[in-house]
Image (cartoon, rainbow, N blue to C red):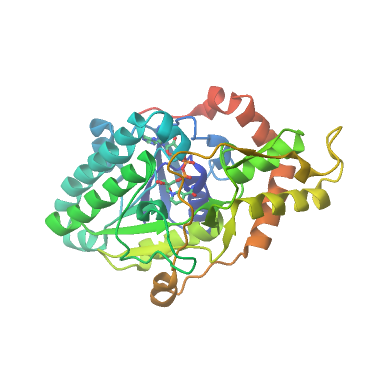
């Protein structure tokens, strides 16, 4: 049994990772999360009673608390997911993105380095600092057939992707300069259960069910490579346990779709799974509304995930069709979770969170 310190474990991907770690492995998980608007402990209710799960509410930039947690829990692995993650919010106010994504990552690296330097040789050799990043650091793809590989030069477009790119550079430098055993993964767009409804797929599902407009940026031709979040959680575990130190692995779903295709696919699933439409709505797709495009919006991202496939034997289990069906079904069956996000009560209750 290892002790895994997960940052940002109350977020969308972090909570999927922790549900996987508690349900599918014997490891102990320490979840360090500040609980910003994106942190939701209700996404962890199914595992939070486990004796192997511990939650600590803290900012990753708080060096005293982070040092204390490393000393107290003696982690074998760190999986760093805590971040400000929404591009539109980064355009409206970049400051938190700089603070959490860059300064927060720097703080964790420094605490991890001091801790790792003092470890006994066996534990020191097995220690890993896994930094979870995004394909958005690579910027826009020009050609219709181009793919991001692990050696594609960085060219971030938004304050979000620039702050993630900066954090990736810090992590690489801590390996090169101080030999800290790091691994980086850069992943494409995730979707699935427990996704905060400001992001495209849950927003469209929930708006459609309420008969509200389904906003699509520009002409809807932006192309993303969609990955089911539980496939991502499995990939992260593979990488942290079997990946090579100092390496980067791209993770993608082999599912390139234009935003408009995604919205239309959700509408057609809802026609089948939620045929009782809101009053006045003849077809869900009639709710689609094209809105002014986001500034600096990248047109196409697509990942070449062959390295993690041939080196570590990972491939996604879900196709876009099976994953999207599971996702729509989940939102239909979990209206309480959605309601608590929409009315804000998920933040007020805090479910007995522990403050260090
Ligand atoms: P999210 O916004 O759903 O969750 C982020 C979590 O981090 C939240 O629980 C939040 O409370 C916590 N957090 C934020 N600031 C913090 C701080 N200063 N200290 C401690 N905790 C803090 O994000 P997500 O979608 O789960 O993404 C997780 C990671 O994966 C991020 O690093 C993101 O860049 C990366 N990523 C996301 C996607 C995607 O499609 N969602 C794709 C590729 C990579």
Which residue is located at x 57 percent, y 63 percent? 255
Residue 1 lies, with reference to residue 208, above or below; the image says below
Q: Is residue 51 visible?
A: no
Whole-percent x and y of residue 40? 53, 35
* Quarter in which the N terminus is drawn: bottom left
Q: Quadrant of ligand 1?
A: top left
212 vs 183, left or right, is right
Say which quarter of the image contains residue 217.
Answer: top right
15 shown above or below 175? above
Q: Which residue appears farthest toward the top when viewing the image? A: 348
Residue 63, position as x, y percentages in the image: 24, 33
- Of 2 and 260, the residue lying toward us: 260
Quarter of the image where the C terminus is located = top left
* Residue 339 shows in the view: yes
**Residue 33's image quarter?**
top left
Counting labels gives 0
- Check the image and report above or below for 26 versus 93: below
x and y, in percent, of residue 247 in the image: 29, 65
For this rendering, which residue is in front, 54 or 64? 64
Residue at position x 49%, y 39% in the image = 294
Front in this rendered view, residue 108 or 259: 259
Q: Residue furthest left?
A: 177
Q: Nearer the viewer, residue 179 or 288?
A: 288
Q: Position of residue 11 (x, y in %)?
A: 49, 41
């Amino acid at each position: 049994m290892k002790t895994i310190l997960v940052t940002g474990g109350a977020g969308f991907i972090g909570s999927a990772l922790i549900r996987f770690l508690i349900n599918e492995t014997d490891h102990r998980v320490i979840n360090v999360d500040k609980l910003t608007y994106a942190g939701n402990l209700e996404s962890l209710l199914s595992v939070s009673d486990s004796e192997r799960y511990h939650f600590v509410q803290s900012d990753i930039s708080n060096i005293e608390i982070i040092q204390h947690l490393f000393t107290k829990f003696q982690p074998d692995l760190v999986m760093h997911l805590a971040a400000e993650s929404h591009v539109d919010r980064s355009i409206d106010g970049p400051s938190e993105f700089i603070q959490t994504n860059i300064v927060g990552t720097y703080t964790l690296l420094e605490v991890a380095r001091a801790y790792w330097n003092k470890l006994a040789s066996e534990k020191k050799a097995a220690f890993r600092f896994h930094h979870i990043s995004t394909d958005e650091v690579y910027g826009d793809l020009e050609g219709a057939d181009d793919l991001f590989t692990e050696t594609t030069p960085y060219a971030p477009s938004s304050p979000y992707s620039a702050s993630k790119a900066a954090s990736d550079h810090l992590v690489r430098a801590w390996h090169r300069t101080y030999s800290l055993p790091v691994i980086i993964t850069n992943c494409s767009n995730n979707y699935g259960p427990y996704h905060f409804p400001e992001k495209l797929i849950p927003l469209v599902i929930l708006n459609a069910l309420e008969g509200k407009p389904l906003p699509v940026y520009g002409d809807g031709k932006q192309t993303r490579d969609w990955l089911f979040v539980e496939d991502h959680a499995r990939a992260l575990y593979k990488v942290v346990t079997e990946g090579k130190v100092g390496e980067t692995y791209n993770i993608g779903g082999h599912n390139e779709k234009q935003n408009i295709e995604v919205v239309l696919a959700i509408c057609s699933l809802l026609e089948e799974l939620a045929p009782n439409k809101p009053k006045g709505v003849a077809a869900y797709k009639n709710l689609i509304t094209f809105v002014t495009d986001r500034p600096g919006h990248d047109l196409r991202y697509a990942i070449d995930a062959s390295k993690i496939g041939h080196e570590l034997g990972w491939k996604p289990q879900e196709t876009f069709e099976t994953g999207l069906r599971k996702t729509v079904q989940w939102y239909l069956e979990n209206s309480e979770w959605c309601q608590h996000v929409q009315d804000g009560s998920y933040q007020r209750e805090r479910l007995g969170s522990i403050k260090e």
